[in-house]
Image (spheres, rainbow, N blue to C red):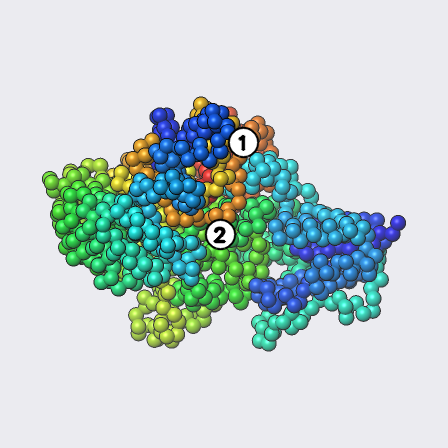
Amino acid sequence: MKRMKEGDEDSNGSPSKSPPEACKKVRKMSGESETVATSESPDCNWARLPQELLLHIFQYLPLLDRAYASQVCRGWNQAFHMPELWRCFEFELNQPASSYLKATHPDLIKQIIKRHSNHLQYVSFKVDSSTESAEAACDILSQLVNCSLKTLGLISTARPSFMEVPKSHFISALTVVFVNSKSLSSLKIDDTPVDDPSLKVLVANNSDTLKLLKMSSCPHVSPAGILCVADQCHGLRELALNYHLLSDELLLALSSEKHVHLEHLRIDVVSENPGQHFHTIKKSSWDAMVRHSPKFNLVMYFFLYEDEFGPFFNEEIPVTHLYFGRSVSKEVLGRVGLHCPRLVELVVCANGLRPLDEELIRIAKHCTQLSAIGLGECEVSCSAFVEFVKMCGRRLSQLSIMEEVLIPDHKYSLDEIHWEVSKHLGRVWFPDMMPTW
Amino acid sequence: MVVNSVHWFRKGLRLHDNPALQEALNGADTVRCVYILDPWFAGAANVGINRWRFLLEALEDLDSSLKKLNSRLFVVRGQPTDVFPRLFKEWNVTRLTFEYDPEPYGKERDGAIIKMAQEFGVETVVRNSHTLYNLDRIIEMNNNSPPLTFKRFQTIVSRLELPRRPLPPITQQQMDKCRTKIADNHDLLYSIPSLEELGFRTQGLAPAVWRGGESEALDRLNKHLDKKVKKKNNRPVFPSSCLHQLRKRCSPPLSLFGQLLWREFFYTAATNNPNFDRMDGNPICVQIPWDQNPEALAKWAEGRTGFPWIDAIMTQLRQEGWIHHLARHAVACFLTRGDLWISWESGMKVFEELLLDADWSVNAGSWMWLSCSAFFQQFFHCYCPVGFGRRTDPSGDYIRRYIPILKDYPNRYIYEPWNAPEALQKAANCVVGVDYPKPMINHAEGSRLNIERMKQVYQQLSHYRGLSLLASVPTIQEEAEPPMTDESQTSSGPDSPSRDLADSDAAGCSTAPDSSTAAQHPDPDEAAQPPCVSSHQLQPGQPASPSSSSCPTSSPSPSPASVAQRRKGIARKARRNQRQRGRPSYPPIARGEEREEAGGEERMEEDVEQEEERMEEEETAAQQQ
């Protein structure tokens, strides 16, 4: 799934078992044996493929192809059922009425539960917007009794349908997994009706192994519920939740001595109704967090009305990735420039009508780690933009701005800015273009 | 030998700059101008009444222009394959001319007609005038695949010679030479149908806001070029069918070139892709798990979303058939990746019904672009259905005009009436939830969800690097969860590029595989952690992916930078002009036309091309999955 990460490229150099080589080996073998025993029927040679090679090949085949291959002979059929091939599975639960994509065949699901549920370790459910699909996922979950999952992901691909499943049904299915799988290390349950008591069950059974917990927009969890997780699960390294669950106590718990270093903390700040009041987090709590985990990423997504930013960015905050999904005022961005020394990435989707010039320059000056910035509907004068790029220089590995918001001024025209910015970045750069439809 | 010509009008409903029509007249004894229309299918087709009216007006205009030349337009009822054999015999036709139609459907239809004409011994002459460039040339220049980024497209186009100059309108003199007798019963047989004949009820139909036809289009264009028309909301409609006179003046107003180039770009991408207008089976379209939600779709299409800005735009679209391009962006983003997470195909169909200037290629292409389904772009930015409109029109006049029930709301709440205090709602005679719908979605929550969904989709596409602006910090799940192989994750039939390499002897394992395939190789330690499986193939019937495009070695050697630099192609002007779009106060091209290029900049230009090619490759690779 994470193919795009750089690490992958290194793998070529090593004595790899990459598909071309593996295939070549196979071809060689079959080729050789063919010359030795030409009189034999060719399928005999294939049947003689060692199991481990077969397994290796099967690992690179899509399930459907494996299923076809399993019908070739008994040996291949056995290979089809090797536990190694069933450790990881993604259930896709879609209804024809609500999704354009196909679903995992019900017979296959039955077979997996019957023959391979004890092999499953890395499981995810992709569920469309229908309640039926979410309920089907819960039904499967509640049958996973004799397996020990390491990772579980419940992913809503469209509208969050787990929220529409009766809460008790969802909770009982989820706790089946918590109770039976004693070594869960990764749990993604965003947009689900998970609640405090079920988190307690999680903690009671998996506190030693849990490393990752993603639970953005889980309205039935309280700050106390998540605090219980933080208190008990000392190996937790990644956590995603909504701002209303974030508390000074939580940060202190995560930065206790017993706790491993936190690597990622993702916070969604979403306003439910306008004028909502948001609490503040003490600077001392953030300081404790940074002392304990000096390298942790603090990722914050803001979806607030402009007038709701009062409690934010008044003091230093160790945020590394900032995403403003709605319009944010110049004033708030000015505060960001002053109080976010660890900022690495900044995305501003929209801003008022006045250019962001001074704010950008201030950000360039104070946010010395900044390496990625994306500006949507934010007016910036060309000379301020060039100045910003010049100050950041080549560390800006990502720079994205829509061309219609760049305001030409006495120093640079729009035509010149592409050259000027490219020069400072040391690579070719263009503003983003929108189609004129 | 007698030459009896028929010119078949389809898209280009104009007498000026019509090379195929000129061919019809060339040395002919008679010429008949034909338009074929099947009234029985008119009502059934997914085309709204405004679009039909626009078309009929364009035909009327064509007919009246031909009348001035002592000729007429022959509107023939039926299907081309039935109509032509009849006409060929009846009129003793020896030559059939028409404009080249680059769209897949049109190409297929025309292929059949050309074959039929051959059987009847009728010569066919086809000329390119619907697009500025020969699209096949562009594709050929890009290693036989259409460029998938606009920048790449511009580069290719800048290497091409300029489009030919527009031809003059046909003249009385030309027409006199091949005058055809018009029968007395012409109006009985070949008149332009009325909307009623096409099965529409016209009672209470509001007068047209935009008039169709060549004369009107030329008039508007000239006014526009003279900068007499400046108001943003008053931008003239340029239905591609009526207009082709853009290189007449030396400095066209802002954005015109850019707009034409985008049109050209989408036409190029679509010309060889019959599935361009759908997600399934479309090799350039990212497969996104859109929601199917007919109720929500209807609310959007009928302007009942509860967001006045969105509803006003959809109302204008329905009433008038035209909306500003930024308004198109706003409603398209709202329907798809911004808020409702509904397939762009549904939105495209609504536009097809209502939008006067909806071209098949441009419409589908723009929808894919805006829904982040193709053409490689950043998608961190979503238009806010409240803030975006407010920034462009703070007093909400646009909303007051198209949603009059909200006209008494103060500026502060006109974009978000649901936030107005109840007393104010009553005082303004419009209570939200009673007189005007409540917002159908919490935009803040919706955007949060949709951004996550987009991340999910794009994280599965290797080779894609557009994610870095969405805080996609490497997460520790990598350790907890084994990586998936691309092959098992999505479809990859026996014809996928990596498989090709694996299977062919030519790709000897002693040579290092190129990076584009190397990235697909699983980790060496994957024996211990098996690749994840997906339970089905996403696209079993996916057409063979062009494996050449993912192979960097097959890219052409870029032409010398200096040459590319000097060429003042239309693309370049367009790029410049397009940048000035929206800033009318800025003097267009204030500096001299020619720039002195420094050596460093030339190198930069080369880099540009390499960069573009690389992006193309990534793009193709990503979308093949």
* Residue occupied by mark 1: B555
Q: Is residue A235 left or right of residue B14?
A: left
Dot 2 lies on which element? loop
Which quadrant of the view contains residue B510? top left
In this view of the protein, which residue sits in the foreground, B598 or B15? B15
In this view of the protein, which residue sits in the foreground, B126 or A402? B126
Dot 1 lies on which element? loop
* Residue occupied by mark 2: B279
The chain containing the residue under callout 2 comes to: B
Q: Amino acid at mark 1?
A: Ser
The dot on residue B144 is none
Instruction: Tell me if I can see residue B35 in this picture.
Output: no
Q: Is residue B617 left or right of residue A322?
A: right
Given this view, does label 2 or label 1 mark the residue nearer the observer? 2
Q: Earlier in the sequence, mark 2 or mark 1?
A: 2
In this view of the protein, which residue sits in the foreground, B303 or B272? B272
Q: Residue at x 11, y 39 (%)?
A: A257
Could you give the CA–CA distance between mark 2 and mark 1, rounded to whole angstroms?
28 Å
- For the view shown, which residue lies furthest in the right direction? B1
Q: Position of residue A245 (x, y in %)?
A: 20, 54
The chain containing the residue under callout 1 comes to: B
- For the view shown, which residue lies furthest in the front direction? A39
Other residues around mark 2 within 10 Å, as few (<14) / some (14–19) / many (≥20):
some
Q: Residue at x 21, y 59 (%)?
A: A172
Q: Residue at x 67, y 61 (%)?
A: B58
Other residues around mark 1 within 10 Å, as few (<14) / some (14–19) / many (≥20):
some
Instruction: Tell me if I can see residue B11 in this picture.
Output: yes
Q: Position of residue A337 (x, y in %)?
A: 28, 43
Which quadrant of the view contains residue A410? top left
Q: Position of residue B442 (x, y in %)?
A: 33, 61
In this view of the protein, which residue sits in the foreground, A82 or B118? A82
